[in-house]
Image (tube, rainbow, N blue to C red):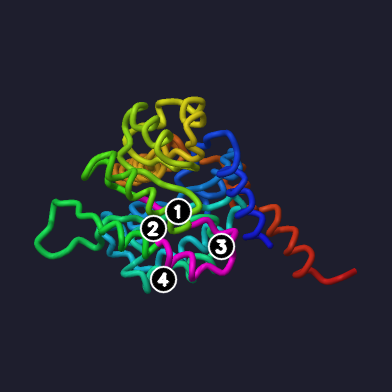
Amino acid sequence: MRWTKRREAFHAILEGDDCIFPASVWDPLSARMAEDLGFEAGMFAGSVASLAVLGAPDLVVLTLSEFAEQAGRIGRAAELPLIVDADHGYGNALNVGRTIEELEIAGVAALTIEDTELPQPFGTVGATRLLSVEELAGKIGAALAARRDPGLAIVGRTAATSVTGIEDAILRARACRAAGADALFFTGITTREEVAMIDAALDGPFILGGGGIADAGRGFLAAHGVRVCLQGHLPIRAAVQAAWDALRALRDGTPPGDLDGIASEELMKRLMRDADHRERMRAFLMPKA
């Protein structure tokens, strides 16, 4: 039931008239921060997952099980709908089916399947290669076939805008829509003109990521069918910088009581849901009168 409500909430976003900016999250605490601050949804990206779980760059060295487990931890901690970046589905179309099964069980509200050829093939370092339109459509079809809960949104994602151009991106998105995708995700969109082009050529809803297009404003994006627009993944970078500064200050001899930017005890207890835990302790670990 928890997953159903979150998936219904995300579909309401896709079917609505507004554009949301989801929170970039990577663990239970960041997800709870997003929830408490009123974000409508969270985004768990592949690059962020690789950094948070492995401390590695976004080279698809993270496994499906590691990704799904972290997504499950996030979903267990916070009630906001979670969009996840399932990359290429961790293999061919058969692997995509397995990816859908694992992430559906993990409780995500939506996931993207993209057309980038991953992991990086031998001899192509530095070049972004795309799957054929036929293989991309097949992967979307495999995702839909593996889905058990129709509330789970399957999103077709293309990187073609910055590789082969906007016209090819529209062609690929159209194939995803024909295969049954619930929404279309474009990376590399950087101008209002490109947003207008995809709106004129395709039926939304659209999700946009990268390129700073969020600066176009919610009103403009919403009017052109964009229902979700990413703002990048700055929160984890801010967290890394804050931890680095605190550790460096301590290493350099700064007394703990003199550190700046430390979360208050009140905030820590709120994010840990301390009151809920203590209530359960009183209810179940104390002798009955």
Image spot of residue 236 (x, y percent)? 39, 45
Residue 65 showing in the rendered view? yes
Asked if the magenta segment contains residue 100, the reply would be no
Q: Is residue 149 magenta?
A: yes
The kind of residue on which mark 4 rests is Ser
Question: Given this view, does label 1 or label 4 mark the residue nearer the observer?
Answer: 1
How much space separates mark 3 and mark 2, taking CA atoms?
17 Å
Specify whether residue 250 is in view. Answer: no
Do the CB atoms of the residues marked 1 and 2 lie less than 8 Å apart?
yes
Coordinates of residue 58 in the picture (x, y in percent): 28, 55
Q: Amino acid at mark 2?
A: Ile
Quadrant showing the N terminus: bottom right
Is the Cβ of the residue at disc 3 closer than 8 Å to that at disc 2? no
| Residue at the image position 48 percent from the left and 42 percent from the top | 204
- Residue lying furthest right in this view? 289
Q: What residue did someone put label 2 on?
A: 113
- Report the residue marked by disc 4: 65
Quadrant housing residue 178: bottom left
Locate residue 282 relative to residue 199 in the image: left or right: right
- Please state which amino acid type lies under the numbered disc 1: Val
Closer to the eye: label 2 or 4: 2
Q: CA distance from mark 3 to mark 1?
A: 16 Å
Percent across and percent down for residue 41 are 55, 45
The residue sitting at the left extreme is 123
Q: Residue at x 32, y 64 (%)?
A: 62
- Mark closest to the chain's N terminus, 2 or 4: 4
Q: Which residue is mark 3?
A: 107
233 shown above or below 44: above
Part of the protein shown in magenta: 140-157
Q: Decide which of 279, 188 is in the foreground and name it.
A: 188
**Which image quadrant: the C terminus?**
bottom right
